[in-house]
Image (cartoon, helix red, strand yellow):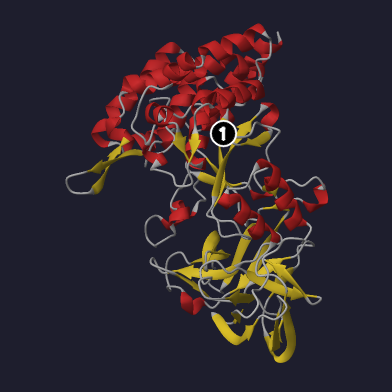
Amino acid sequence: MRIWSNCYLVFLGLVLQCGISCNENTGIPQDVTACLKTFGRQESKFQEVIEHFRQENDSFKLQACYFLIRNIQGLNTGKIDSVNNRMIWQDDITTIAAKQLIGNIDDAVENCRTRLLNGSLSFSDFCEYVLPYRFDQEPLENWRAVVRQRFLPITDALKQHAVWTDTALCNAFNKELKQGFRYTVKGNLAAFKGWSVLSRQNNGNCVEMCKLITYPLRAYGVAATTDFTPAWANNNGGGHMWNVLISEGGKHIPFMGLEADPNAYNPLLLIRNKDAGKNSYHICGKVFRKTFSINKNSLQSIAGGKLPIPDIFASDRMIDVTREYLPVGDITLQVDTSYFPRSGARVAYLGVFSKGQWQPTAWGLVDEKGKVRFKDMAVNAMYIPIIYSGFSFMPIDYPLYLNAAGKLVSLIPDEHSFMQVRVKYLQSKEMDQLDVIRKMNWSGEAFVPTLEKIADNKLRSEPVNHSEYTLYYWKDGWKETRTARAVDKQLAFDNIPRNGLYRLVTKGSENIARCFTMEDGEQRWW
């Protein structure tokens, strides 16, 4: 009785939802009708799909159909024209066949029907993280049945041991896909590769890894997607992407495809020490989640192609999930309105420092009085307000951060009050540990103890005696102070403005040197 009761409630909810805003003549929701009108000559194809499911009288499939139609605008396949050396885009509205859409919906719903009925998978999570027929700009293919055939021996074994759960499936798929996979730092156009290519090439970076594991999970009705950060705030690596399992009850469990299983992965953990208090972590300003549905509050949706926006925000299919991972607070600033056009949307960004540049990680709309609010910013990450011209980023204020208590701290150098800056280390523990990891030429016996020595400050990057280093502080750019020569593996700079953000540079380190502040005479790295 419970199953049929839940089924009735789900069906009733869908009917009521449709009834509130349906076209009286067709019974199709008004927003879906509006979408269809933009499809031109392709409208009849989608009407055919709608009519197919209306004839079936299956509420799940019909509503799934409406969901895809609402969000298909802007989806496409990218192909390289080797003759003219340019990208050709083929819109899904034009290229996808009615039969392919129907097959995808049939397959996805039938593999999830029991869970949809008993409530262990919400219909919204199903639509967002199971139903989608594509991930990026890869060629369209009917991948669900092919993927299930590949993993059939594994799932048969799981059934025999009565351990058919989302996490058990994920663990088994991870174990299978790891075999023979080779990690490469540099990706290779992962966005344009579907299952057939990815499963053959068997190598790639975190993007390929995330994509590979998501195929079998969704093929078996497990809601999964990817989370990512645009850039780390405390090291010079690029951004990072990892997977997230949308488990029963809406619980979100991070994991790393082909590397680490659910409940055994923290995407922000850099090095686990035997003393947990000495663990080292990545710090980021933002974490976003990839969705299939169009986020009407995204910058891309708001901009509407009328102003340049950074590539990282060019997608309108992502949501902010920073607060799921980190303590956060809002940052409200007053900025000079002369930087912005008099009409249209005015956008400011917060950037984090990476590879010698300020990289955008968050955005906010500037009102007519110059007020801008950045929501859910991670605490203890260094930011700077910037604007984007379409070609470059320009800082428009001083660096700032939210402390652990959520208080905004601005680093405005006091050029009337000075101090001595004593430098013991050239970079943070995290950067030292990353250097060890990147070399990857340590024996198993030496690798872990070396990382632990760094955590204990017994093996750190110190100034090289007799070498010269130049100290900078931020004021409308990096402003040079003095150059000093290292003595006894230390540096001392006199008469340096207090309350600044500093950077130490030597020959060859211009693009890797990181920032620090001085707190109680010690360097605090950012």
Residue 400, x across and y down, in percent: 66, 71
On the question of residue 222 being in view, the answer is no
Q: Residues within 10 Å of mark 1 (few under 14, many from 20)?
A: many
Look at label 1 and name its amino acid.
Gly
On the question of residue 11 being in view, the answer is yes
Query: According to the image, label 1 marks what residue?
Result: 257
Residue nearer the viewer, 358 or 373 = 358
Q: Residue furthest left?
A: 83
Residue nearer the viewer, 263 or 305 = 263
Residue nearer the viewer, 442 or 223 = 442
Q: Which quarter of the figure is the N terminus placed in?
A: top right
* Image point (38%, 25%), residue name: 26
In the displayed structure image, the side of residue 227 where residue 47 appears, left or right: left
Residue nearer the viewer, 407 or 502 = 502
* Image point (67%, 12%), residue name: 3
Q: Secondary structure at mark 1?
A: loop
Residue 45, x across and y down, in percent: 29, 25
Q: Which quarter of the figure is the C terminus placed in?
A: bottom right
How many numbered marks appear? 1
Residue 118, x across and y down, in percent: 66, 16
Q: Quadrant of residue 29?
A: top left
Q: Quadrant of residue 125?
A: top right
Image vertical order of residue 140 relative to residue 369, above or below? above
In the displayed structure image, the side of residue 489 where residue 126 appears, left or right: left
Residue 344, x across and y down, in percent: 42, 66
Image vertical order of residue 451 relative to residue 149, above or below? below
